[in-house]
Image (spheres, grey):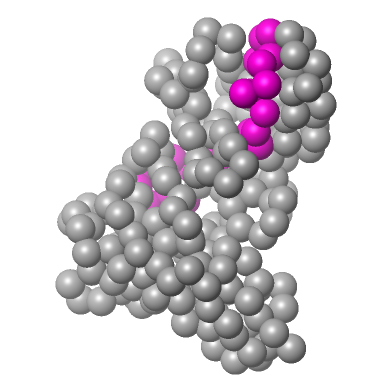
Amino acid sequence: DAKTTQPTSMDCAEGRAANLPCNHSTISGNEYVYWYRQIHSQGPQYIIHGLKNNETNEMASLIITEDRKSSTLILPHATLRDTAVYYCIVFSGYSTLTFGKGTMLLVSP
Amino acid sequence: GAGVSQSPSNKVTEKGKDVELRCDPISGHTALYWYRQRLGQGLEFLIYFQGNSAPDKSGLPSDRFSAERTGESVSTLTIQRTQQEDSAVYLCASSLGTERNSPLHFGNGTRLTVT
């Protein structure tokens, strides 16, 4: 899988938008960008994924740059329960699925 | 709807004993995966099932590890003669298919501790 780079940690005030960046400059044309999060002692939770176009679902929005070398996950109205480690993954196959260090998002009151 | 269910959530066993871990995938998901996550480390692929095809066992670390799946439903991961290095969280995931456009949905895992 292509390598991704994310900030180690970010802070966000409750109710504000959380924008989590990810660089994936070596992504290839048929690889998808996936976002997962993991709250302590739970399994990874799927959030959203995309190939080229921006995507939105009930949890978040995903903005992918035109050259596909970076993306941003947006949680529009962060809550305390959104505090977790967020992983940006470039997915090319289940056997090589890797979760890097991720970004620890801390949402504060 | 119901997500991926794993049981037990925690298992403590003595070195040398056999353990069996269970996974109930999301209904309708044809693909099922087992991963291992050691403390502070990333995911390690173990085995993958897709429909009636032969499973991909390329990630199993030794012949002490085996897994079965009945049709497109429950899967069990068996570890024989457990060793202390087997201590980890064992995660199961399922997906609608195996395309890159099919998200994997994970259970909360079974935390295995071998004493």
The answer to whether B90 appears left or right of B101 in the picture is right
Does the magenta run of residues contain A34? no
Q: Position of residue A4 (x, y in %)?
A: 33, 60
**Residue B33 visible in the snapshot:** yes
Which of B94/A35 is in front? A35
Which of B24/A41 is in front? A41
Bounds of the magenta segment: B78-103
Q: Position of residue B88 (x, y in %)?
A: 65, 33
Q: Position of residue A49 (x, y in %)?
A: 41, 62
Q: Quadrant of residue A71 in the image?
A: bottom left
Instruction: Give the answer, above or below, for where A15 lies relative to B55.
Output: below
Instruction: Give the answer, above or below, for where B27 lies relative to A102.
Output: above
Instruction: Give the answer, above or below, for where A35 lies relative to B90.
Output: below
Residue drawn at (72%, 35%), measured in percent from left and top?
B110
Residue drawn at (61%, 58%), measured in percent from left and top?
A38
Residue drawn at (72%, 78%), measured in percent from left and top?
A80
Q: Position of residue A108 (x, y in %)?
A: 69, 85
Q: How many marks?
A: 0
**Residue B18 visible in the snapshot:** no
Image quarter where the C terminus of chain A lies is bottom right
Which of B34/B103 is in front? B34
Q: Quadrant of residue B23 in the image?
A: top right
Does the magenta run of residues contain B85? yes
Q: Quadrant of residue A63 in the image?
A: bottom left
